[in-house]
Image (spheres, rainbow, N blue to C red):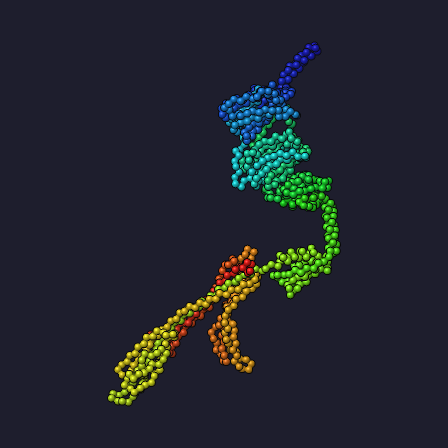
Amino acid sequence: MMSRIGRVASLVLFVLAWAVEPAMGQPPVAPGRPRADEPGVAVPGKVSGPVKVTEVEVEPLGPTSATLVVASEGPLAYPESFSLPDPPRVVIDIPNAVHAIRTPIQLAKGGPVVQVRSSQYREQPVGIVRLVVDLSTPLPYRLEVVGGRVKVLIGEAAGQVEEIPALAKAPAGEAPRPTQILEEQPEEVKPPAPGEGQVAKIDFQPLKDRSRVVISTRGKVSYKVSEIADPPRVVVDISGASIAPEARRSLDVRQLPGVVNRIRSAQRPKGMVRVVAELKQRSSYQVAQTPEAITLDLQGQEVAALEAPPKPALGAPSEALEMAEIPAPIPPPGPPAAIAPPGPGRLSLDFKDADIGNILRILSEVGGVNIVAAGEEVKGKVTLRLINVDWKQALEVILKVNKLDSTERDNIILVASEATIQRERAAKEEAELRARRKVVEQVQLEPLVSKILPVNYSKAEDLQKHLDRLKTPARTDVSIVVDSRTNSLIINDVPAAIERMESLLKDLDKPTPQVLIEARLVEATRTFSQSLGITWGGASRAARLGSTTTGTIFGTGFETPVPGGPINATPLLPISNTGPVPLFVNFPAVGTAPAALGFVFGQGNRFVLGAQLSAAENEGTVKTLSAPKVATLDNQEAEIKQGTQVPFTTIDASGRTVVSFIDAFIRLKVTPHITADRRVSMRVEAERSFPGARIEFVGGFAFPINTRKATTNVLVTNGGTIVIAGLLQTTESEAEDRVPFLWRVPVLGYLFKRHSIGPNERVELLIFITPTILEETKLL
């Protein structure tokens, strides 16, 4: 019974083991990857060794379409791929593979594929076969793995595949489709807009203790740095820039020393360029910016990484190379911000635990100087963030916080500890002091010589104070004596000091330039006067009819009177004789030979009346011109004066009347200065004084003196002319002579008055000044 039960149990266990064995042999399905039980999908989980790639078949489907099929001796793993725009090509890396293609890859005419190159890209730790497909023009592509073979669909054969976000998942209950990797096509490269920056070149430099990525830039750009934990990457986003075609490439540097596998770059929307450094392991990084480049330094030592999810088994499909989408970055300490580009001689530094020697090398490159660090004294780490600072200021701060100092010798900056620099400075000062003492000792033992230095154009006394500063300071027996008669300097000093004095005297004792001042003084006088007057008188007699007795005489007969004189009586009436009769109204016009109109009328022999109207008007213009010239030295005042003397009387102590004189003149003072650009700056003072109306007083007379003055500073070209005007004098007068009371009678009042205007006088002074620099050749 027990043996029967044992046989049944063994049978059940065998059936269960047979049923479970296929499930245990199937590898886990990665999210987004095709399942092994789907048709046309290889099962890489059981691959025991590298697979040989034996052949590549190319089938053109048209001018812009083709397919490539990669054949092998076993199922191939999912490859990695990327495209390059210049020249257009697609690069495919097949992992866990061995290059076994023995014959050249044949190409048919008429397709977009120009050439297919294959090689063993890497052998350890995992073999990689690289295929490079050269295209005639940039085209989209996608990859498929069918029956263990890799198929590349190019151009129209790739179809229109919508971009799928990297983290998108298939809907619940729907089986995922076979993995299709559509490499993102770079955005079209356009020339930079005016004022926009540009990424010109991307280089990789493997250094001794770090890996350096140099992003050469043009114009003003800003950057932002992010770090990706898994897989390890450092992303540099450059804002306000476009990428040059020659810089748009992928650099595979995994064979070079350092922590960088590959460097990718792409043009992003909205004027941003993204540069991605794919790392072998997480590493600390430092970023520095200069006007010409952004430098990313990645340290060689490994940094403790965050816990990452387990990697897929060998041969599992690798993730697509997404240039458009990058997983959420792990920001470095402190939120990264856009950094404005520094100007010439300025830089931005963002370091954490950076070696101070590396910082000094960056400062040396930016400042264009040589910096030498003093061995073991200059070491340590520094953490800093400096934005757009001068390199000298950055050097000073970094040295101060690290208790270091610097000294400069012939464009070489020596950096050492503060104690070393202090000893260096003390030794240098001591050496200089010893050298000075040695020179002083030599000078004190040197014999004195005497020499006479004549002075030609200056005063020897004025130059003595300048030469005193050049005397040998270490000796008290040296001297400089002035000989005023010959205008010379007698110097007693060592030969070297006398030579210095001669050189200075030669530079100072030069002829002072002269300026010729030409002045034209124009005085314009305009006068005007007008006068209107009347003269009249009469005579009459009264007598009885037939009587011979003379009656009262009111007047006599007369001829046309002379203006201003009496009416002369003539025996026009039958009377014996009458003398001259004074005029009743005698207001003739004032002037020389005025115009006159006279008339006489009477009645029989009873009376006679005579009258004369006269008028005069005068207008004149007088111009007085003088043109004096005077030459003067630079910065010396020149004076031009002309005028007359006006008399006036005074009474002395003894009571006698004394006649004195005072000047009435036109005076011009000019102080010229020759500027460095051969123009003339002048201070001008113009003054005019003239006598006023005569004043009578008991015991004498006097004339008041009126004065007009103008002062100015002007700048004139050599030979130019300036004008000073406005020294103006105006005199206006109006007078009326009349008979009291009678002149008020309407209309008839004009017979009893005289009206005069003037003389009015207007005097204006114009001064024209022309400075001319007298060259030495004109003075010879």
Residue at 55 percent of width and 35 percent of height? 244
Q: Hey, which quadrant is residue 91 in on the image?
A: top right
With 590 as the anchor, is 574 left or right in this view? left
- Image height check: is 441 above or below 539? above
With 19 as the anchor, is 729 left or right in this view? left
- Image height check: is 368 above or below 229? below
With 58 as the anchor, is 11 left or right in this view? right
- Image height check: is 325 above or below 754? above
Residue at 53 percent of width and 41 percent of height? 195
- Image height check: is 591 above or below 509? below
Q: Position of residue 651 (x, y in %)?
A: 53, 80
Q: Looking at the image, which is closer to me, 530 or 492?
A: 492
Instruction: Please state, as top left, top right, bottom left or bottom right, where the N terminus lies in the image.
Output: top right
Residue 313, visible in the rendered structure: no
Q: Looking at the image, which is closer to me, 720 or 592?
A: 720
Q: Position of residue 592 (x, y in %)?
A: 38, 74
Q: Position of residue 762 (x, y in %)?
A: 44, 68
